[in-house]
Amino acid sequence: MGETVLITGVTGGLGQALAAEFAGHGYDLVLTGRSAGKLEELSMQLTAKYGCRCQTVAVDLTDPTAPQWLFDRTEKAGRPVDVLVNNAGFGDVSAFAASDLQKDRDMIAVNVSTVIALTRLFLPAMLIRGHGGILNIASMAAFEAMPEWAVYAASKAFVLSFTEALYEENRGRGLHFCALCPGPTATGFEHAAAGAAGSKLFAETADAAEVAVFAFRSFTEGKIIAVPGAKNRLEAMCAG
Ligand SMILES: NC(=O)c1ccc[n+]([C@@H]2O[C@H](COP(=O)([O-])OP(=O)(O)OC[C@H]3O[C@@H](n4cnc5c(N)ncnc54)[C@H](OP(=O)(O)O)[C@@H]3O)[C@@H](O)[C@H]2O)c1
């Protein structure tokens, strides 16, 4: 039996590219997102192209019961998850004093609380098996505070710090822990983030498939922090 990767947010640009990248390397997939229709379509495409086995689980990750429900679905399918990719996430652009508090709470639920909960649920069995690991999708926004993206940047700083701590705690136990920190990438992200579309920040974007190739390689090579693109790496170094 091949290894299985669970990827959240595969209905978006980067998630879809990551699913194809893992499938191309022989992984079976557990695909999650909010739209059951889009998940089925992607599952059919990937199965036809790569011959992988796919389980789809439609779930809204703002629901605090979602991570446990998702974990239970994979257990019921008898499918050990070797690699967890916490990819689902979104941002919002607004001066914080005028921000939509419910949206901020939802952002923390998806970008932070879900990452904690899924890690807590899947990590113990990974440690027993002694292989696989967790790839968390952070952002260049993790490296410095961003006015008008205050909650988003803070959520990604959390993801980066959390991933580094997991790596240190579990060093030498056979697992990989990697925080991918992409810069602006051509996906649905800037359109989902109200106020971001057309902003200077997205004038130059990376290709999602190329970022996914870099992410897979960095993860399997055991990188802890993976920043795609030379310009981004320089910026991250200056910020650090
Ligand atoms: N694109 C960039 O410039 C960029 C840069 C740095 C980091 N990132 C990070 O990369 C990751 C992937 O984003 P992307 O660029 O691929 O953007 P995207 O195309 O907008 O995809 C985001 C994914 O997250 C899912 N998601 C959002 N809210 C959800 C919820 N409540 N429940 C379940 N799933 C939810 C979306 O599902 P729906 O289809 O249902 O909305 C979608 O599958 C995110 O964590 C993002 O912060 C992106």
Image (cartoon, rainbow, N blue to C red):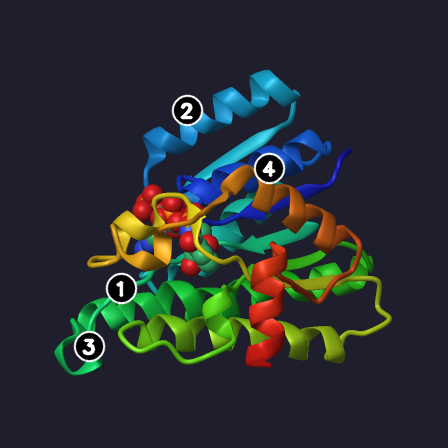
Rendered residue at 71%/54% (across/down): 219
Residue most toward the left?
98
Q: Secondary structure at mark 3?
A: loop
Residue 180 appears in view: no
Q: Is residue 115 left or right of residue 161?
A: left
Among the two numbered marks 2 and 3 on one chain, the one whose residue lies closer to the N terminus: 2
Q: Is residue 4 left or right of residue 181?
A: right
In the rendered structure, which amino acid carries the disc numbered 4? Answer: Leu
Residue 141 location, x and y as percent?
45, 69
Q: Between tags 2 and 3, which lies in front?
A: 3
Nearer the camera: disc 4 or disc 3: 3
Q: Label 2 to label 3, Cα distance in Å?
A: 38 Å
Q: Label 2, on which residue?
A: 41
Mark 1 vs mark 2: in front = 1
Instruction: Answer with the quarter of the image where residue 41 lies.
Output: top left
Q: Is residue 65 left or right of residue 29?
A: left
Eyeballing the image, is 68 above or below 240? above
Few, some or many residues within 10 Å of mark 4 (<14, 14–19, 20+):
many
Residue at numbered disc 3: 95
Disc 1 and disc 2 in contact, CB within 8 angstroms: no
* Left or right position of 197 against 142: left
Q: Which mark is residue 92?
A: 1
Q: Check the picture and name the quadrant holding the N terminus.
A: top right
Q: Does the beta carbon at disc 1 come under 8 Å from ligand 1?
A: no
Local packing at callout 1 (Cα closer than 10 Å; few below 14, some 14-19, many 20+) is: many
Q: For residue 29, which numbered disc appears in the image?
A: 4
First of labels 4, 1 by sequence position: 4
Tag 4 secondary structure? strand
